[in-house]
Structures are given as C-alpha cells and as structure tokens.
Amino acid sequence: MTRTGFVPWPEHLAREYVAKGYWRQRPLGALMWDWAEAYGDRVALVDGPHRLTYRELAETADALAEGLARTGVRHGDNILVQLPNCWEFIALILACARLGVAPVLALPPHREHELTHLARLAGVTAVVAPDRWRDFDHQTLAEHVARDRGAGCRVLVLGDTVRPGNTGVRALMDRAGDPAARRRRLDASAPAADEVLLFLLSGGTTGLPKIIARTHNDYEYNARRSGEVCGYDEDTVYLAVLPVAHNFALGSPGVLAALMCGGRAVLLPSPQPAAAFAAIERERVTVTSLVPAVARRWLAAAPTSPYDTSGLRLCQVGGSVLSATEAADLMAGLPGRLQQVFGMAEGLLNYTRPDDPDDIVRTTQGRPICADDEVLVVDEDDVPVPAGRSGRLLTRGPYTPRGYFAAPEHNARAFTPDGWYRTGDVVRRDVAGNLVVEGRTKDLINRGGEKISADEVEDLLRALPHVADVAVVPAPHRELGESVCACVVPTAGLALDLTEIRRFFHERGVASFKTPEVLMLLDALPRTPVGKTDKKALRKLAGEAHVPRQPRSPAASALQRL
Ligand code: OOB
C-alpha cells in the first residue's frame, strides 16, 4: 500500500538499510506483540491513576484497531490526531500501526487554521480529539475540520461527552471477545514495514506546515537506536512532559524506546515543575526530555522542591539553542546527567553520549546516532567547508526521509537532487564529529522549542487591512529564547496594536503560540541592496528593542513607532 505523495528512499539504499539491520522489516504492530510476549505483566504506561501492562496495552490497541475499522477507517487511510499526553494516545498510535492507518500528529494548541490545512494535505478520513482540553471545546473544532473534509470524515472523541453523530474512542477500546482471534485477524491484514507509520509536523518551513511521513522501518530504527545510545534498558522509566505528538518525546528515544526495551513510560499533560518532580519521585523516573525553556523553569524550581528526584539518571535537553553557560548551569542544578539533543522531525538525531566528558556535553549538541548518517557542512554554494568551520548542515540517512509528503515544489528547494535534506541549520563540526549549532538560515521563530514559520505569520498579517507591509522576525525572550515579533508598516490612517492582532489571529483560528507578542511599527521596511526585506536588520532592531513579556506596558509602548 503506497501513499501518493510519499517519497521513498532509493531502492539500493533501502536494501542496504535492511541488510545492515537498521530496517527490521517488521511493522510496529507486530513488534508491539513481541514486547507483550517478552514483558507481559510489567507496567508499560502510567498516566495518573491508570497503569497498563504490556499485555493490556497490546490487547487494548488490538481492540481499538478493530473498533476503528468498524467506523470505516481502513488500511491506507490517514487520520488527524489531536490529543494531549495520555495513555490513550499511545494506544491509538499502536492501533493505527496495527491497521496500516497513519495518524497525522497535531498539537493540542493547534486550531482550525492549522488543523484544516493538515486534514486537507493528508486527505484524512477521521479526526480524533478530546471532548474538551484546557477549557477549549475540541469536539466542536474537530467537527468543523471534519465538515471541511466532506461527508465520510468521522469525528472520534476521547472523553465523557460524545455528541450524537460522533464516536467515542473509549467505546472502541472494548476488549470483549477473544484477544487471540483478534490478534490473528489483525496479523493477517498487517501493513508492510516500508509503509507510512505516522506523520510528524515539520518545524517551520515556508508557508503552512509540511508533514513528514515516517515509515515503520525508519521510525522504529529512530527510536531503537536512540534508546541504545541513551542506555535505555528494562529499568528505564521515561517521563514525557513535552507533547508526545513531538518526535522528541515520542521516539527520540522517548516513549517508544522505553516500550521497546521493557521499560516504562509515564505521561504528564504538562511540564509544570512541581507535578513533574512529584512524578519523578513517585514513579522513580530515570530519564526525561526537556526543551531549554522548560529546563530553565525546572532549574529555578529545583532548589525549593521537596521531592526526591535523585533517581533521575539522564536529563535530555534539546529542540532549541542552549548556550555553554546555560548548559553548565543545568549540569550543576538539575538532577541527572545532562544530555544535549539536536534533532529534527525530518530525521537526523544527534546526542551527546552519557559517558562523554563534561566538556563535550557542555559545549556541543552531540553526534549522529548511525554510522550511515551522512552529514555535510557546506557553504552557500553547497561546497563543503573545512572541519571546524561553520556552514549549512545537509544530511541523508536511514531515518531521514527523502522529501516532505505531497510537497514537490517545496521538496525541490528543501532537498538537493541527490537527496540531501537541507536542514536550514548552521553548524560547526569538531574532529570527533560532534556538532555545535551556531544559527540557522531558515526563516522561523523557535519559541521555546515550538517552531513557527515567519512566512505563515506574515501571510496572516497581510490579510489585515491595517497592514501595508510586514516582516516577522524573532525577538529575544528571557524564558522562551525567542518570541514572534511583527514588524509592520501600517496603512495610512489605520491604527494597529497587539490587541487587534491578537483578536484577528484568534478569529482566524490560529494556534495562540504563533500570535505576535512584540509589535514594531515602522515607516518602511529596511531593504537589502537587491531590494529584499532586510531581515537581519530587523532581527537586530527587534533584539535592541526587546521587551520582556512582563511587564508589557511602558516598554512596549516605546515600540509602537521606531
Ligand atoms: C526537534 O525537532 P523539530 O522538528 O521540532 O525542530 C528541528 C529544528 C532543528 O532543525 C533546529 O533548528 C532546532 O529545531 N533544534 C535545535 C536543537 N535541537 C533542535 N537548535 C539548537 N540546538 C538544539 N539542541 O526540535 C527535536 C526532535 C527530536 C529530538 C530533539 C529535538
């Protein structure tokens, strides 16, 4: 079953990846049963009061797979999934894997703007959402998104309030009936391992989000090899505080690697320090992963925390830039050994190793996980630069797909003709192969690890009559690293402020984390000699004019007209 829009690896490499044991040629659903056979009564998932053993998880995933099939979702379909961290999320991913249905993993803050786009792009046949989450009515949102897809797109709801016409996810998990017979039926119609397992969202390319099809083969390797590099074993207890819809918490090594080696995954709906520290003590957590913004909050909270977090062996930090000074602070003040992670939903993963010297852990973002990860550091003309010099990072490898899904025009820019992915990151590589991230060429805002396309926000702002010209750049932010700064040339006679922008974005159904938090009103945008918007100059302005989020008023008003 091939999905139109999927870009495969060249055949000779696919064969090589199998021969070298990277690709195991077993779909994740089959592996799930291997885990259940090996670790049956051990606890696999913990979510508040819910504790599921490996066997319960496998049986529930099978029941859900057949439940999904009864609603009409079938092998080869794509579905949109928007769920917070909860055990049902993991059961759903495994159920989809069993059926050959690929979930598009949206984030809980996404709204109609993003979800409608993703649903169309992947041609989904169902939308899965909670009934409510953080005071927001996701069921109604899911109904709107499904309606846009037309008749036949179902709404599946996780929660107590399932409206008529929609289907309850919990009811689909009913384990009545013979699990062995169900297992045989699902085995008989299992997908092939080179089919799409799931879709991850790209971290901010041009325009609306792109999606990345990850296969059973490549994503299983992504998680398994990451687990090996990070020393995962049966005693591993992984705490997921970042969204499991993200590659970092899901499979790098995250929840999936914990399940692969008989460990345990503990799911929390937020990275709030007190709840996280309590969970680390209660569940004897050994490893967790954080973005720097969260790590900073944990660092601030650690000295007064009453909880025993001494069981934490490894504290992974990645997703956005971490300076050597900050890394040193985290090494001194957070429980567990620091591990830097430089990864991407597009594939390539770099980790400092648990036994690396302090100096490497403090000053680098680690090295690739696979001997066949190809890494090139090049100049503007794609010519490799000497070791130790900084340049643009290109990569290929067994878990780095060869194109975004159904995006041929974008792929022509984001990939070289011979399949190298242009990461958009500027790095330096030391003699041992460790990478140091020094910047980026891609036009995005990295807001606490959440990537926001400048292009997308600019397009939205252009729809406001008040906006004559616009450019979006990052503004430094004390906690988040960066926030969205809108540089606007206003239409003569029309006043514009952040409240108006916020209202507009809200009405358009845009995820709130993309809403500009800093506004610079300008008479004209600076231009480069060739007439392009000079974003470098604007970034500098935004940096100089930076105002902390709190308090906003006096300093922010100084920004109203520069
Ligand atoms: C992770 O994945 P994405 O897809 O959200 O974002 C990838 C981009 C990278 O290209 C780079 O620009 C940035 O995020 N990034 C870092 C970084 N780790 C990621 N920039 C500086 N330092 C780092 N350590 O962010 C992701 C995926 C898997 C594991 C970890 C992070």
Image (cartoon, grey):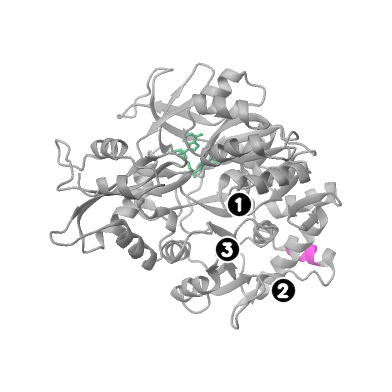
Give the mark toward the camera: 1 or 3.
1
Residue 374 in percent (x, y) is at 50, 30
**Is residue 26 something that shows in the picture?**
yes
Mark 1–mark 3 contact, CB under 8 Å? no
Query: The disc labelled 3 sits on which kind of residue?
Result: Gly
Residue drawn at (64%, 34%), measured in percent from left and top?
303
Query: The disc labelled 2 sits on which kind of residue?
Result: Ala
Which residue carries the number 3 mark?
76
Toward which corner of the image does residue 307 lie, by quadrant? top right
Quadrant into which the C terminus falls: top left
**Is residue 20 something that shows in the picture?**
no
Magenta residue check for 183: yes
The mark found on residue 232 in the picture is none
Which residue carries the number 2 mark?
171
Q: Residues within 10 Å of mark 3 (few under 14, many from 20)?
A: some
Question: Along the horizontal axis of the image, is 218 left or right of 520?
Answer: right
Residue drawn at (75%, 39%), measured in percent from left and top?
236
Which one is in front, 92 or 88? 88
The mark found on residue 270 in the picture is 1
Please tell me which of labels 3 and 2 falls first in the chain: 3
Residue drawn at (56%, 20%), measured in percent from left and top?
360
**What's the magenta region?**
182-186
Q: Is residue 455 above or below residue 110?
A: above
Residue sitting at the far right:
41
Magenta residue check for 105: no
